[in-house]
C-alpha cells in the first residue's frame, strides 16, 4: 500500500512539473504574437524616436532632437491644441449623451431592447461608411443639416467640413454619435446594479426624478462613469479614421489631431523617427491624464 502511494505521489509530482511546460506550449502562439506584434514594435519605435530615418535611408542617431523639435514647432503646437479641443468636445459630449440614453432605456419595456441595439449599431458600423453618410449630411448645398437650418431661418449655414472654425467640431460630433452607444451599454450595466428599493424609498420621502438622478443615480453610478471617462479620454486621442475620411486633416490643418499627424509624418512624409517621438509624447500625455484622473477619483467616485 505504501509502495502504491509512493508511486502515485511520484506520478502526481511529475505531472505537476510538466503542467507549466504544457501551459506554455498552449500559450506560445499568443505569446509569440504578443512579442512580435506588440512588444517588439513598442521597443523599436522608442529606439526610432531618437533617430532620423526616412525609410529608404539608414537611421541616424540624433538624440533628443525629435522631441525638442516637437516642443518648439508651431505646427506641432497647433496639432496638440486641436487634440485638446477635440477632447474637450468629445469627452463630455459622449458621456452626457450616453448617460441620457442609458437612463431613458433603463426600464423593462420590450421596445427598449430594440433601441439599445439601434443606438449601439453605429459603434460597430464601418467608420468609412459612417463618414460617407455624414459627409452627405454636412454637405454645404445639398446636406440635410444645412437644409434644416435654412428651413429654421438660418440664412448662411456653415460649410461644416470646409470651414476651419467648424471642421474639427464636425468631426467631434460624428465621433460622439458613433461611440456614445458603446458607452451607453456600459452605463446601462451599471444602472442595472442599483437596487430599485433605493428609488422607492426616495419617492416615499418625496424626492422627485431630478433629485433622484443627482443624489442617487450619479453617485451610485460613479464607478461606471469613471471607467467610461478613462475610455473616452483615450478614444479622444485616437481619432484617425473619421478625420481621414471626413476632412483629411483640413482645411489648412484645422482638423488635424495628433493621431492623424503621426500618420502624416510616418506614411506621407516618411519621417519615422519624428513620428515615433510624436507617438511616445501622445502615450505620455494619455498616461499623465489617466494618472490625474486616478488621483482625483477619490473626490467624486463613491466606492
Image (cartoon, rainbow, N blue to C red):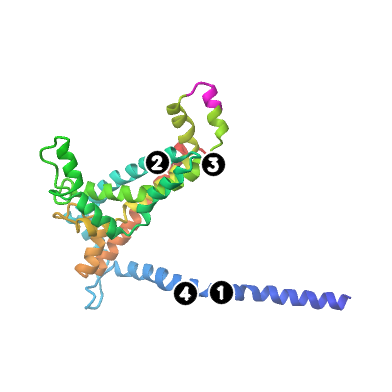
Q: Which of marks 1 and 2 is in front?
A: 2
Q: Name the residue under label 4.
A: 32
Q: Name the residue under label 3.
A: 193
Q: Where is residue 239 in the image (x, y as percent from the top left)?
A: 29, 55
Q: Which of marks 4 and 3 is nearer the N terminus?
A: 4
Is 276 placed above or below 287 here?
below
Taking the image as drawn, is residue 291 in sight? no
Between residues 44 and 252, which one lies in front from this camera angle? 252
As drawn, the residue found furthest toward the top would be 206
Q: Name the residue under label 2.
A: 101
- Looking at the image, which residue is at 26% across and 51% down? 83
Is residue 138 located in the magenta-colored stretch of the structure?
A: no
Q: Distance between the residues labelled 1 and 2?
A: 43 Å
Q: Distance between the residues labelled 2 and 3?
A: 17 Å
Q: Distance between the residues labelled 4 and 3?
A: 39 Å
Is 195 placed above or below 210 here?
below
Q: Which of marks 2 and 3 is nearer the N terminus?
A: 2
Q: Which of marks 1 and 4 is in front?
A: 1
Taking the image as drawn, is residue 212 in sight? yes
Q: Which of marks 4 and 3 is in front?
A: 3
Q: Earlier in the sequence, mark 1 or mark 3?
A: 1
Amino acid at each position: 500500500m505504501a509502495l502504491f502511494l509512493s508511486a502515485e505521489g511520484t506520478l502526481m509530482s511529475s505531472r505537476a512539473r510538466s503542467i507549466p511546460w504544457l501551459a506554455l506550449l498552449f500559450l506560445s502562439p499568443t505569446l509569440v504574437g504578443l512579442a512580435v506584434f506588440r512588444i517588439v514594435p513598442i521597443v523599436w519605435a522608442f529606439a526610432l524616436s531618437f533617430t532620423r530615418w526616412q525609410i529608404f535611408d539608414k537611421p541616424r542617431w540624433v538624440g533628443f532632437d525629435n522631441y525638442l523639435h516637437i516642443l518648439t514647432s508651431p505646427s506641432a503646437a497647433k496639432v496638440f491644441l486641436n487634440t485638446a479641443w477635440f477632447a474637450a468636445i468629445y469627452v463630455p459630449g459622449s458621456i452626457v449623451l450616453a448617460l441620457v440614453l442609458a437612463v431613458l432605456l433603463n426600464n423593462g419595456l420590450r421596445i427598449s431592447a430594440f433601441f439599445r441595439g439601434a443606438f449601439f449599431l453605429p459603434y460597430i458600423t464601418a467608420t468609412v461608411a459612417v463618414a460617407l453618410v455624414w459627409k452627405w449630411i454636412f454637405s454645404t448645398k445639398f446636406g440635410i443639416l444645412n437644409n434644416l437650418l435654412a428651413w429654421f431661418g438660418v440664412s448662411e449655414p456653415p460649410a461644416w467640413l470646409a470651414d476651419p472654425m467648424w471642421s474639427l467640431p464636425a468631426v467631434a460630433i460624428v465621433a460622439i454619435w458613433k461611440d456614445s452607444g458603446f458607452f451607453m451599454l456600459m452605463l446601462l450595466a451599471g444602472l442595472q446594479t442599483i437596487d430599485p428599493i433605493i428609488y422607492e424609498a426616495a419617492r416615499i420621502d418625496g424626492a422627485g426624478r431630478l433629485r433622484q438622478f443627482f443624489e442617487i443615480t450619479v453617485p451610485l453610478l460613479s464607478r461606471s462613469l469613471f471607467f467610461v471617462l478613462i475610455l473616452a479620454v483615450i478614444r479622444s486621442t485616437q481619432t484617425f479614421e473619421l478625420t481621414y475620411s471626413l476632412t483629411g486633416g483640413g482645411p489648412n490643418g484645422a482638423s488635424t489631431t495628433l493621431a492623424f499627424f503621426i500618420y502624416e509624418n510616418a506614411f506621407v512624409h516618411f519621417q519615422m523617427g519624428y513620428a515615433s517621438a510624436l507617438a511616445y509624447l501622445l502615450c505620455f500625455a494619455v498616461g499623465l491624464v489617466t494618472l490625474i484622473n486616478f488621483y482625483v477619483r477619490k473626490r467624486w467616485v463613491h466606492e
